[in-house]
Amino acid sequence: MSILKNIAFAFFAFLPFFAYSQVHISNQGHQEAVSSFSSLATGNDSSYFSAGNDGFLIKWNADGTGEHYQITNLSIKLIAQNPANSEIAVYETDNAKVHSVSVWDWKTLQRKYIKRFSDSITSLSYTAQGSYLIVGTTALNGTFFLDAQKGSVVKKISENMPIISMAETSNSEKTCVMYSPNGNLTYYDLESGTRKARFATENALFQPTLFANNEFFAGVKDNSVFIIHATNGKRLALFSAENPILLNSKGEAETGLFFLDKQGKNIVLKYIDNIELKESIKSGRQANFKIIAQFSGFPAKDTITSAIKTADRIIPIVGEAEGMASDTNRQSGKIIFGTKSGNLYELPAVANSSVQTIKPMTDKAYQKILDVCADGTDFYILTADSVYRTAYSEDLSATAEKVGVNNGSTNLIKYGNSVILWSKDTRKEIVMLNVETGKRTPLFTPSNAIQILKVFNDELVYIQGNSAVRMYTIGTGKDTELYTGTALQDIILYNEKDLYVAKSAAENDSPLIHVDSKTRETVPVQAKGSIAYSLSHEENQKTPAFYGISVQSDANGNAKTTVFAYKPASKSYSPLLQFADEDPEAFTAIYQEALYTNIGKSQVRSYNTSSKKTLLFKRSASMPLKVARSPQMLLILNRDGSLSWYKPAFAAVVSNWYLLDGSWEISE
């Protein structure tokens, strides 16, 4: 099997990819751990990027605001900026089977190409002039040079290469040095493709980095910082440090290496320069680091996950008379680090003998909206601690009216004058909240984790533990088992009698099962695919069909995701929309003749079940998670917990809403 697998541009041919996107500007941090940073050491541009496990890229500007844009529903582990243009490369992964590198143009928010790899990625970097993107993987001979503009693989090195975790080129791009965790620093001639030299050095180093014009090399292992001569592999110094984070920028002014050391409750910024290292080589003694500054106030329960030092900047000093630059002043770069909680901190990289108190440069001002549902023209929204009622207002004067308390439930469904609160993948108690009085009524506690819960008349139909479908009757409290199986995905109680169960299919089996809820008789439905999920229909409406999603793979492992319609009366299965890849998190939702889905992972589209016409809605800064509909408005819940409003017949976003202390922050 090939190590590298190209992925086709797997989108509908008549629809532009990620069209009409926009960033969200705020000083909000990441929602999950900050995984990587990248900055350019060119000119006076002090901006830099952060990436997180929430799938967001954020470009941080000199004024402290961030341009937020979610490019994936997966974790981002590595990022690299092209020094020649506005492109940024991203390694996104599910930490299991999916390992992809995508390249984006930040100015247009367009993805240029994507490459899939069979193995996890250990290194991601551009060559010095941006001609190539170097991707290192955990496979032997699994280092690839990609043409930075086309994404095609280019053969630059003739010999088989070991696994690498760092690759950097000279400014001319004629030479490349790579570090392998097996304990080698290897130099290659990229013009001839041959090896120039290889030096044995310390193995299994993390955070490998070159500094001082690539003369010295550093890495971390066993709570120690190793300093190594990059031209012979010999160790020059070894410093003990608690979970140290190395910091290095590539600006011309950089002559040494900064690193963070956690000492008790304080964070200590340390530095070793190339002059000290050169003197230690001459004298034969170990070099010493300098303590630059100490910082207190970092939360004890948080941890540093990634960091960077922005480059020093050369600022012209303008003469008063001539108005011309008469001298220059060096402005020291800043230390930026991110944490497990998603916050970012900014520290000055200048000497200070006092212990300084630090505070995050980001905040968590927005309340994340977990779920939404519609009730006529009103919408109910769920946060971690509250349930609110709201409605769209043309004059942007909308309010968020608190109607009840939430004790940690993650999902809600409208039922009469109440909402049903439940929590996916947990055994948490199911509660009915009266939205007029605020009264909470416990219904039942599942004996196993609930995967899906839906309302039909006075029945709650739910999947428990991926293996049992049960029905709870509100009022009587009767709880009945309707069906048992394996790998259950979703359910639809189409009417009082007909239950449909979506599941993972065994070989030559159907992913859709019909169950007679009265007799418990089961019959396979003629549906295609290895798995079906996201079933939807309008409860209490006499619609001829229900809808869902299936995934089918061929003998070569190529997947196809299909949005389908199934008509129980005629027992007919019809594919409606297809996506040439696997999309396990796609949803469907039906409102009258409008079928909504986010198949393709990036945007919501509506499919008119009568006219067969499709409308693609422009996305916000975050990717869509769910839709809710009123007669006048379409509401999209985004993955970052924000809301986007649309007129159902038009593609443009009307406004984006962020919940801030129980009130709305609204942007056009």
Image (tube, rainbow, N blue to C red):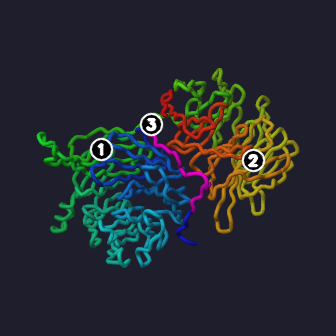
Farthest top residue?
437
Quarter of the figure with residue 654: top right
Which numbered tag is attached to residue 665? none
Which numbered tag is attached to residue 468? 2
Residue at image point 17% right, 49% down: 328
Residue at image point 32% right, 77% down: 197
N-terminal-most mark, 1 or 3? 1
Decide: marks 2, 3 in contact (CB < 8 A)?
A: no
N-terminal-most mark, 2 or 3? 3
Which numbered tag is attached to residue 347? 1
Q: Which secondary structure lies at badge 3?
A: loop
Q: Nearer the viewer, residue 424 or 8?
A: 8
- What amino acid type should be assigned to the residue bearing mark 2? Ala
> Within 10 angstroms of label 2, few (less than 14), some, or many (20 or more) residues?
some
The quarter of the image holding the N terminus is bottom right
Task: Give the total of numbered labels.
Answer: 3
- What amino acid type should be assigned to the residue bearing mark 3? Lys
> Within 10 angstroms of label 3, few (less than 14), some, or many (20 or more) residues?
some
Q: Nearer the viewer, residue 242 or 155?
A: 155
Percent position of residue 582, x then y: 63, 57
- What amino acid type should be assigned to the residue bearing mark 1? Leu
Which numbered tag is attached to residue 364? 3
Whether residue 502 is visible, yes or no, is yes
In the image, which residues are magenta? 8-24
Relative to 230, is 53 above or below?
above
Percent position of residue 177, x then y: 34, 70
